Image (spheres, coloured by chain):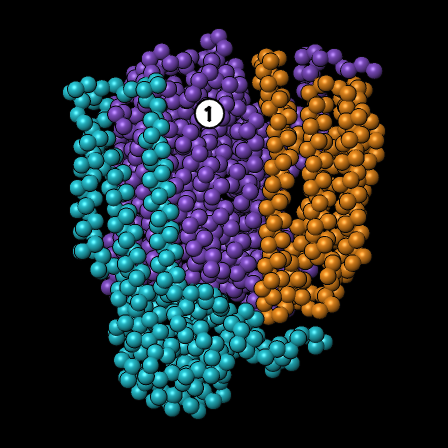
Amino acid sequence: MTISAERPTETAAGTAAPAGPRRVSWTNRPGWMSQHLGTALVLAFLGYLLGHWWGNHIAGNYHYINGASGQNSVADFLALLLMVVGWLVGIGALNYPIAKLFGREAVEEAPAKGMSRYFRYTLDHKVVGMQYVVGTLLFLFTGGLLAMAIRTELLNPTVHIFNPGTYIEIVSEHGTIMMMMATSVVVGPLGNYLVPLMIGSRRMAFPRIEAFSFWIFSAGYMVIFSALFYGGFPTGWTGYAPLQNQAGPGMISYLFGFAVIGMGMIAAGFNIAVTIINYRAPGMTWSRVPMFVWSILATASLLTLATPVLFSAGLFGILDHVVLTSLYVNEHGGSSYLWENLFWFFGHPEVYIMALPGFGIVAEIVPVFTRKPLFAYKVAAAGMMGVALLSFFVWQHHLFQSGINPDMRPLFMLTTELISIPTGFIYLVGMGSLYKSKMRLEIPMLFSLALYFNFLIGGITGVFLSDVPVNVTVHGSFFVLSHFHYTIMGGLIFAFMAGLYYWLPKMTGYMMNKKLGLWHFWTMFIFFNMTFFPMFIIGLLGQPRRVFEYAHGLQGLNDFSSISAFCLGASFLLFFWNLMYSMIINPKKAPANPWDSLGLEWQTANPVPLYNFERIPVIVTEPYRYSEPGAPAYADFGGGGSDGGSSGAVGSSVEE
Amino acid sequence: MTDTYKDSTAPNATPEEREFEFRSHIGSIWTGGRLAIGVATFMYASLAFAYFYLRSSNNSHLWRIPGQLAPLYYGWTILICMLVMAGLGMYGHSRLRKGFTNDFQVAGWTGVAAGLIALFFQIWELVVLPFYPGSSGYASTFVAFVVMNIMTIVFATYWLETAVARSLRLRKELGGTRPELSSAHTARSFRANVSSMSYYLGYVGIISIGFFLMFYVQ
Amino acid sequence: MNNEPRHMRRIVTAWVIASVIGDLLWWFLVGPHIPPGNMTESAHWNQFDFNVLAVTAIPVVFMVWLWMGYALVNWRDKPGVPDPVGGEAAKAPYRVQAAWISITSIVVIAAAIYGTVALIGDHGSGGGEGPNPVWAPEGAVAANTAAIQGKATWSPAGHQPLVVQVIAQQWKFTYRYPAFGGMETSRLILPVGTDVVFDVTSLDVIHDFWAYQLSVKADANPGVNNVAFADTHQTGQFMVRCDELCGIWHGAMYNSGRILSKTAFMAWATKTEAQNASNTKYLPPFAWTYTPDANGASGGLYPDGNVTPYSPYDTYGAKQPAS
C-alpha cells in the first residue's frame, strides 16, 4: 500500500484532471444557446406562467384560498417561486449543483471575455462586484423615484395627488426596496470586489455561492417589483401581522421577496465571512487586516446569522397566506406579536448590517487622506465586532409601546444605549485621525467627513429614541423616520458614495470627474440635511409616519422638506451624469494609485488581472503606516512582481 | 462544500502558492461547514421560538385543541430515517478515515436511501394530517416545521449523495488510487468535505430528536 | 515646536464656551416648547427627559463639530502645515483611548439609569404596558380590574382613577366609559386632575393610540389589552392620532379630544350616558372584542365541542389581572 506520490505536477493534474468533453457548465458556450441574462429572463417568464397555471390548477376550487378578492394565493406564490427557479436555471446557477449529484467537480473554464461576462453567471469576484454596482444602483434609483412620489404627495396636507391606497403602496415599496438595497449596497459591490484584493487573495472561497448571491438578489428585485402589479401591499416595510394577513396578493411579493433577498444575503455573507477567515495572505494576522475588511467581516457574520430569522419569518407569512396556517392570527392560536419579535430580531442586526460597512469605508479612507496612521486600530476593530454582537440583544426597543414585555423595557433601554459605546469607538478613531493631520479634501474624504457629520445626528437621536419616556412621544413619528434616514442614508449611502469615488478608479480604470463630484457632494450634503433635519421637528410636532394627511400647521416644514428632497433627487442625477460622463463619455485614465494609498488593492496591476496578484503577497507590517519615513511597504510581492509598495512619504499624484 | 478549488488556480501559481491556497480551501470547507450549522441553528431557533411563544401565549385557548397530534407513526419513521442517515453519514466518515472507502460508500448510499424515505414520509405526512393547518397554533407551527424539515432533509441528503457520488468518481479520476489514501488535492478536498458533512449530519440528528420531542410528544 | 499653537487648549476652551451657551439656550429658550407640553404628568416629565438628553447631547455634538471644523481649518494640506507625524509617535495614546471609552461608558450608562428611573417613577411614562401593567399609579390597577369586571365607578369627588377603554378599528377610535354604563363616544373627553387608565385594544389590525399632548402612546393589538396611564393636569384640547400603519386610510385616522374640569366632565358624562342608554344596554361595559367567540352565535368554531368553554371576561384576556 503506497501513499500516492507528492508530486506537484501530479496534484496540478489532479486539479485539472477532467479535461476533455466533460464540461459541466454551459455558461461560456458561445451563441444564443449559452446561458445568460436573456435565457434567464425567458425561463423566468415561462416559470411565472407555469406557476400561475399550476396554482390555479391545484387550488382554483378552494374558495377559502381564493377569498373574497378572487385572487388565488397558491397561484400567486407558485408563479413567483417558479419565476425565481426559472431565473436561476436560465442563468446557469443550478448547473454545478446538478453536476455534483453525479460526482462531478467543476471544470476549469476559460473565463468569458468582454462585456458578455457581466450578463452571465460569472465566477470572478470582480465581475460580481460590478454586477452588484449596477444592481444596487437600480434598487437605489427605483426607491429614490418612489421617495420623490412620497414627497410630492406630502406637499399639501389635504389636496392629494395619489389616492390613499396608491400612496401606501408607494411608501411600502419605497421602504422595502431601499431596505433590500441597503443590505447589499456595500457588501455586494465593494465587498465582493475589494475584499479579496485587500486580503491578498486571488479568489473568493465559494465563487458559485457568490455568483448565486447576486443573481438571486436580482431575482429579488423582480419579486418585490411585481408587488406593484398586484396592487402593492399596505404594511410598509415592517409588514406587521394582522394587516399582513388582511392584505392582498402584493403581500406575497413582499414576503417571498424578503425570503429571496434573504437567501442572497445569507449566501453573500457566508462566502465573504469564510473568505476573510481563510484566504488572508500570509502574514496578515488579525491586527493587520484593513479596517474595511473588519467591517465587512462583522457585517457578513450578521448577514449569515440574522437573516435566517427573516427567512423563517417570511416563510411563516407565506404559509399563512398560501396554506392558511394561523401563525400570525390571534384568533386561531397564532400571535401577531410573533411576527413583531421575529421581524425585529432580524431587523435590528439588519440596522447594523446597514451601518457597519459605512464605518469600514470611512475608516479605510480617512488615513489615506489625512496621511496619518489610523488612530487606535484595535479600538476600531473592537467597536465593529462589539456593535455586531450587541445588535442581537436590542430588538425589543422597536416594541416599547407595543405591550410586549413591559418589564423588559429597562433592559432593552440599557442594551440599546450600550451600543453607543462601540459606535463611539468609530468616532474616536475618526476624530483621532484628524489630529495634526494633513488633510486632503478629495471627494471621498468629503463624503467621509459628511458621514461623521450626519451619523452623529442620527446616532444621538438614536439615544433619544432608546429612552423609553422620550420614546413615548417620538416612536413611530417623523422623528424616527428622520433618525434612520440620517443613519442609513447619511451614513451608509454617503459612505457608499465615498467608496465609489475612491475605488471606481480601481474598479473601472477611470477617474470620476472632480468638478462634477464636488457639485454632487455639496448638493447631496446640503439637500440631504435640508430634507431630513426638518423631519425631526415635524415628528416632534406630532406627525406620524406613513400618513398622507397631516396638520395644516405643518405644511410649511413639509414643503421645505419636499422641495429639498427634489433637489436631493437632482443631486443623484448629477451623480449619474458624473458616472456616465467619467466612465463612458469622456473617460480619463486613472493613475495606478491616484490617492497614494498604501492599501493592498492599489498595488495590483490596473486593470486587475483575472487572478488579482502575480504573486500572492506576504504582509509584513500593519496597514496605514503613512508619513513614516523608512516604514516597510505593507506587503512584499516577492521580487518586484508589482510596482512595489509606495513609501509612507507624502507625494500627491492627484491632478488638481 | 467543495465548490471552490478548481476554477481559479492562477496559471502561473508556484507550488508553494498552490499549497497555500489549498490550505485556505480546506479551511474554508471547515469554516463553511460550521457556518452552515450556524445558519440552520438560527432558522430552527426561530421555529422553536414560534413554538414556545405561541404555546405560552395560548391565544384564544387555541394553542392546541385537546387530542390534536401529528401522526405518530410518521413521526417515528421520519425520525428514525433521519437518525439512520445522520448516523450512517458519521459512521461512514469514521470508516473513511480509517481507510475503508467501500464502507463509506455503502453507508453513504444507505444513508441516502434513508434520507429519501424520510423525505417521502415527511411530504406524505401532509396528506394524512388529522387537522387542518390553521386549526390551532400547534397545527400551524407543525406545518411550518414540516416545510423546514423538508428543506433540511433535502439539503442533508443532497450533501451526502454528492459526497458518495464524488467518492466513486474520484477513484476513476485518481487513476484507481483510493480517495482516502491519495494525497492529491482533489482527494484531500473530498475528505475535508466529508468531515464537514459528518458534523452537519450530527447536527441534523440532534435537531431531529429535539423537534420530534416538541411536536410528536404531547 | 514652540511656534505650534496649543491646539487642545483652544479647542477645549471653545468647546466649553459653546456647550455652556448651547445648553443654556436650549434649556431656557427651546426646552419649554418641546412637546408634548404640560397637559399631563407624564407629558411634563417626558418633556423634561427630552431636555435632559438634549443638554447632554449638545456638548457631544459640539465637540465633534468643533473638532472637525478646527481640523478642517488648521490641518489641511496647505503651505505651512507641518507634515503629520508617523511611526511610533502617531500611535494612539493609551490614556486617550481609555478616557474616551470610560467617559462614553459613564455617560451612556448614566443615561440608561436615568431613563429607567424616569420610566418607573412616572408609572410607565404614558407608554403601553401590556395587560399587566408593572408600574401603575396608586389605585389604578384596582380600578381597572373593577372596570374589567363591569363594576367601574367614577365621581368628581376624591381621587378615583377613571378607566377609559380605547377601541381602535380601521379607521377610527371609539372610547368606552365603563363607569358610565359603557357609553361609547367618538371623542375622548377627560376630567382634569385625574388618573386616567387607558385600556387600548383593537378590533382588526394593529393600531397605535397616540394622544399627543397627553404623552400617551400604546399599540392597539387585536385581542390584547394594552394599558397606559395619564395624570391630567390642564384643561384644553388635544390630538389623537393612529401611530401604527393600519391600512390605506391610516393617514386619516385621527380625531381630537378635550380635558374638562371635573364638574363639566361629570355633567357631560351623565348627559351622554342618558342619551346612549337605549343602545348601551345591549353592550357589555367592557370587552376586548365584538367578534362572536367560540361559544358564540356561530355555535363555536369546533362542532366537536372540544373547545373549553370560557367566560367573556377571561376570553382574550387569558393574561388579564387576576380578579
Q: Which sits in the foreground, C239 or A47?
A: C239
**Residue depicted at x 76% and y 57%:** B125
Q: Position of residue A140 (x, y in %)?
A: 41, 44
Q: Position of residue C161 (x, y in %)?
A: 38, 77
**Residue depicted at x 33% and y 45%:** C107
Q: Is residue C131 visible?
A: yes
Q: Is residue A635 above or below residue C7?
A: above
Q: Which sits in the foreground, B135 or A234?
A: B135
Q: Is residue C158 left or right of residue C142?
A: left
* Quarter of the figure with residue A32: top right
Q: Quadrant of the N terminus of chain B?
A: top right
Residue at the far left in the pictured view: C3
Q: Is residue A396 left or right of residue C9?
A: right
- Residue type (three-letter) at the residue carrying disc 1: Ser
**Residue depicted at x 28% and y 42%:** C60
Which chain contains the residue that carries disc 1?
Answer: A
Q: Quadrant of the C terminus of chain B?
A: bottom right
Secondary structure beneath label 1: helix
Q: Residues within 10 Å of mark 1 (few under 14, many from 20)?
A: some
Q: Is residue C62 above or below residue A166?
A: above
Q: Position of residue A296 (x, y in %)?
A: 47, 34
**Residue depicted at x 72% and y 23%:** B187
Q: Which residue is mark 1?
A: A287
Which of the chains is purple? A
Q: Is residue A459 visible?
A: no
Q: How many numbered marks appear?
A: 1
Residue at the far top in the pictured view: A639
Chain B pictured colour: orange
Q: Which sits in the foreground, A570 or A318?
A: A318
Q: Is residue C19 above or below residue A518?
A: below
Chain C pictured colour: cyan
Q: Position of residue B135 (x, y in %)?
A: 66, 67
